[in-house]
Amino acid sequence: MSPAMLLFWFVVIVIVASAALVVLSRNILHAAFSLCLCFTGVAGIYLFLHADFVAAVQLIVYVGGILVLVLFAVMFSTHTQEGSVEPRRGRLALGAGLLVGALAFVSVVLLVKNLRAPINANDTVAQARAEERNLARLEKPAQGEEPGSDEEIAASKARLEGLQKQSEYRRTVGVDPENPIAERRVGLGHLFMGRYILPFEVASVLILAALVGAVVIVRKETRA
Amino acid sequence: MNTVARLLAQGPDALANYLLLAGVLFALGIFAMVSRRNAVGILMGVELVLNAAGINFVAFARFNGHQLDGQVFALFIIVLAAAEAAVALALVLAVFQTHRSIELDELDEMRL
């Protein structure tokens, strides 16, 4: 079993176990903390799917934002239990904490190493290289092969030029086209500002409305 | 049994593994929404369901030629989850201020 495989199943087990704890634990505060673990694991799954930006947003918004809100709501709305002073930590709990911390560290290192490996199938650089090989084969065929017709050579040259222009454009906007992570980031930006501009703007209005609505709902009535 | 062994061996390279994981998360989320009596607990179930949907979007996009559209949808899901959580938790606090409880079994009147 390769490290990536072990890591994948480790993350899956963490997600399922913590989600089960969210559902089953009696103490709602414990459920909130296992929800934190679950969200972190889902961010790891996004890294396995080569969605590094989504993983970062998941960590920032879910773990950093939503979870804090949930914890606030839990602590505001449940009556504090008496006798909640923490007893001394047992040796077992200490060992478990150290083990989980070390595993989390190894996971982060392996996941980040895992990121660089994939090259996007729609990558312009890879396509340009394939087109270059195609053109070379058409112009100087190996022994026993027919050379390409003039139209084929012209079409191949036009495709190659288009791909090179795209790579050049990416370089001018400050992106290294050899880097798949940057490719994805720029691709996401183009999608948000291009094909999905309307949902993007609607989402921003929605967030504003939700924030104002939340403030209005919880605000205590005060006489002016 | 053969299928299980194959999926175990394929690990992160099989679409089915992500779909199964998302299915488990979805089922656990629905279970939490139905069985929890605490309003915040139900919200946690909703969050689990939204996470499952996000995993599905990104997984299908990844196994359909590394498209990016699925990641855009996952980001929209995260945005919607944030907005939903803010409003719902504000509602929970408002209910708590008037009823001193957020156990949904005890809330049987519409009046605030």
Image (tube, coloured by chain):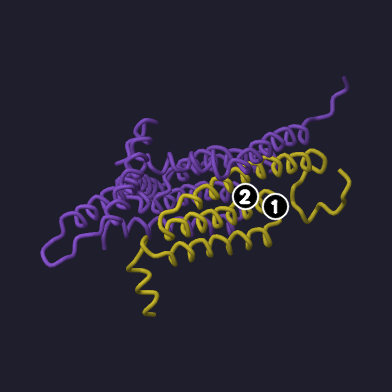
Q: Residue at position x 37%, y 46% from top?
A: A104
Where residue A99 appears, as percent x and y from the top left, is: 34, 49
Q: Chain of mark 1?
A: B
Q: Which chain is yellow?
A: B
In the orientation shown, which residue stands out farthest toward the left? Answer: A143
Where residue A124 appears, as percent x and y from the top left, is: 34, 46
Badge 1 element: loop
Instruction: Give the residue pinned by disc 1.
Output: B38
Q: Quadrant of residue A69?
A: top right
Q: Nearer the viewer, residue B101 or B83?
A: B83
Q: Residue at position x 76%, y 53% from top?
A: B104
Q: Chain of mark 2?
A: A
Which amino acid does the dot numbered 1 rest on? Asn
Which amino acid does the dot numbered 2 rest on? Ile
- The correct choice, above or below, for A191 with respect to A175 in the image is below
Q: Residue at position x 60%, y 43% from top?
A: B79
Q: Is residue A14 visible?
A: yes
Q: Are marks 1 and 2 in contact (CB under 8 Å)?
A: yes
Mark number for residue A28? 2
